Amino acid sequence: MAGVWFGSTAYAQEASAREAQAQLPLDQREVGWFDPTRVDPSPGRRLRSFATMVRPLEGNINAITKQGSREAYISPRRRLTYGEALHAIEACSRLRDAKEEFSAIPLRVGECRELVRAVPEAYQRTPRDPDLHPALQDLGDEINEDIREALFALDDPDHYYPGVDDGIEPVTDDHVKLVIWAMQRELDRELRPAEGQAGMLTSLPAAPLMELPWHIQRALAERRRLRFKQWGIGRQQWEQGTWSLWEVPCDADYVSRRAARLNAA
Amino acid sequence: MPAPTTTPTTTPVTNPSIEPWPHRYTDPARICPQQRREGASPDVEP
């Protein structure tokens, strides 16, 4: 009986600690308390990406390791915050190996047979296409927010939706078509019920991106190129299939648009 | 004695021509996290 009581108390304490930590911005939050599946408006472009990749070492709550690894990067005497852990790896010469590991992270996860350079003539739908590394969830979310905002043009042809004039290489018409095809490929894959409804019987069809006005399609492709650049990813990283955390700007004030929108709702 | 009356029931109807897009199509921001990462299509150049 005592064991049950102790167990439930420990569980309640952990739940309480989790909630308390979740209220803190990531730079003040202890490593281990970031849950990327929750809506979390905590700021910091590089910090959010970093927080997805590290966790406490099993058996030593103070030590910090990378997801999927059993070797500690840092073994401090007290539990560090995400801000402290990132700063240590950025600045400490003894952590050079750890820093190096974060400089060549896979860009794509899942099966990627080949890079797609043109709209395939006979596309065979696959069970899964490559997705971004989980530490690039914010990048994926920003692109989905851009798609979401573009869709208002389906109802309003005068919808204000600017593209990107400066700071990116010009996007060709063929590339706009390729990007829209690729986005549609993924939208077609997963359908959801409308807001407030439940059950897959009420699933809505995928939004038809090709019905958007051409200038909106173009703006969407330009924004996508900009979003990748905002995470330090251009053609070279795409060809190599790797990205570096150190090329993601620190951008301490950055807040995920999706998290901000859902948190305010 | 008056005959019992029946309240007419109306079935809600969705009119695709007047419903806003989030009621007509799946909202890309509501799909699952992995699917949102797939939506970035990393096999296609930025």
Image: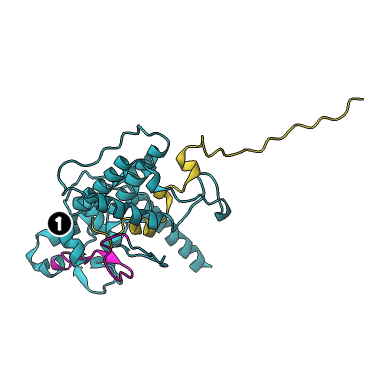
Chain colours: A cyan, B yellow
Would residue A206 be seen by someone viewing this image from the given angle? yes
Is A174 positioned to the left or the right of B10 in the image? left
Q: Quadrant of the C terminus of chain A?
A: top left
The stretch in magenta equals A100-119
Q: Where's residue A51, x and y in %?
A: 26, 58
Is A90 positioned to the left or the right of A205 in the image? left
The vertical placement of A213 against A109, above or below, is above
Is A27 positioned to the left or the right of A129 in the image? left
Residue that mark 1 sits on: A247
Residue at x 38% of width, y 64% of height: A123
Disc 1 is placed on an element classified as helix
Q: Residues within 10 Å of mark 1 (few under 14, many from 20)?
A: some
Q: Nearer the viewer, residue A31 or A161?
A: A161
Residue furthest to the top: B1
Q: Quadrant of the N terminus of chain A?
A: bottom right
Q: Where's residue A163, x and y in %?
A: 24, 41
Residue at x 27% of width, y 57% of height: A136
Q: Is residue A43 magenta?
A: no
Residue furthest to the right: B1
Q: Nearer the viewer, residue A76 or A150?
A: A150
Q: Nearer the viewer, residue B42 or A69?
A: B42
Q: Chain of mark 1?
A: A
In the figure, residue A109 lies in which quadrant? bottom left
Q: Is residue A105 magenta?
A: yes
Would residue A35 be seen by someone viewing this image from the given angle? no
